[in-house]
Structures are given as C-alpha cells and as structure tokens.
Image: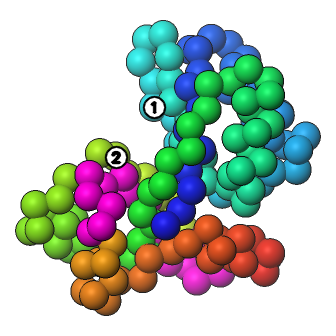
Amino acid sequence: MVKQVSVFLENAPGTLSSMARLLADAEINMHVLAVADTSEFGVARIICDNPVQAQSVLLDEGFSVAMTPVCGVELSDTPGSLADFLEFVSSHGVDISYTYCFIEPNSGKAVNIFRLNDPSFEKTILEAGYKIVSDEDLLTSTNEN
C-alpha cells in the first residue's frame, strides 16, 4: 500500500507552483506528480518520500488535502505488461478509478499506481505473483540514488 497525497487546486496561474514550492522548501521529494483538471479545479496526486509531512505542510498553508491509500504494482517495462495486468484485474470484476505510472530508477521497472474499488484485492494480486510496492520500497529506492 502506498500513501498518495491528493491536493485540490484552483485552476489559476501559480497555484501548482505554490504547492510545489511549499513541498520543496520542506525538503519533500515528489516521486510522481499527476494532475487532472476540470475548468475550475484540478487534483494533484502526489507520491512522495514523506506523505504525512507533505499533508501537514499543505494543510498549514490552506490547501485542501486528502491522504488516500493506493495500490502500487511493479510491472516490467515491456509492451503488453500493463495490458496483461489490466485484463487480470478485469477478469476479477474489480474496477479501477484511476491509474498512473512511473519508472522506478533502480530496477527499471514500471510502477503503476491504481485506485481500486476493492482494496482487499491486493491479496489476490500478490497471490498471482505480482509485486506490490510500499512507501518503504519507494523511500529505499530514492535513498539509493
């Protein structure tokens, strides 16, 4: 399980940079930043080295922040690996609310972040032989660079 920090941002010039500056000044390293927007607001989804501190820093400055547990799954960075995994999830009738991915620098593997409608499905993912990534895995990876 990975802790994701979700920040609700007004869609206005400088809002995203203000959020990034606050995290930088607190020496929080973002591993992943994914932003989805509508015409007036956006949601920044952040995987970072210290999600608890990130949430605290942003709340202290008036940002609307939520901490969400998400499922990080390590997949090979090859054509078809994501399609195979998505078919596996679909075959069990589990919905994915959203997903995004990044390459883990030390292993060269893709880490896919999923918001699943059934968090207990992680046990089935493990039993199928997939590796689930934790916050500790990501922190160790960052410290090795």
Residue found farthest to the front: 120
- Residue type of the residue flagged with mark 1: Ala
Q: Does the magenta stretch include residue 119?
A: yes
Using the image, determine if residue 77 lies above or below residue 5: below
**Number of numbered callouts drawn:** 2
- Residue type of the residue flagged with mark 2: Tyr
Could you tell which of marks 1 and 2 lies nearer the N-terminus?
1
As drawn, is 62 to the left or to the right of 137?
A: right
As drawn, is 56 to the left or to the right of 97?
A: right
Circle 2 packing at 10 Å, graded few (<14), some (14-19), many (20+), is: few
CB within 8 Å, label 1 to label 2: yes
Name which quarter of the figure residue 86 lies in.
bottom left
Residue at 56% across, 37% down: 66
Please state the horizontal and vertical placement of residue 112, each as a whole percent of the image: 42, 63
Circle 1 packing at 10 Å, graded few (<14), some (14-19), many (20+), is: few
- In front: 126, or 30? 126
Residue at 74% across, 44% down: 54
As drawn, is 61 to the left or to the right of 95?
A: right
Residue beneath label 1, please?
36
Q: Can residue 73 be seen in this view?
A: yes
Using the image, determine if residue 24 lies above or below residue 107: above
- In front: 120, or 26? 120
Q: In which quarter of the image is the C terminus?
A: bottom right
Q: Give the range drawn in magenta.
A: 104-121
Name which quarter of the figure residue 36 lies in.
top left
Coloration mode = rainbow
Q: Is mark 2 on a helix, strand or loop?
A: strand
Please state the horizontal and vertical placement of residue 35, each as a whole percent of the image: 52, 35
Please state the horizontal and vertical placement of residue 138, each as a whole percent of the image: 64, 71
- In front: 144, or 134? 134
Residue beneath label 2, please?
98
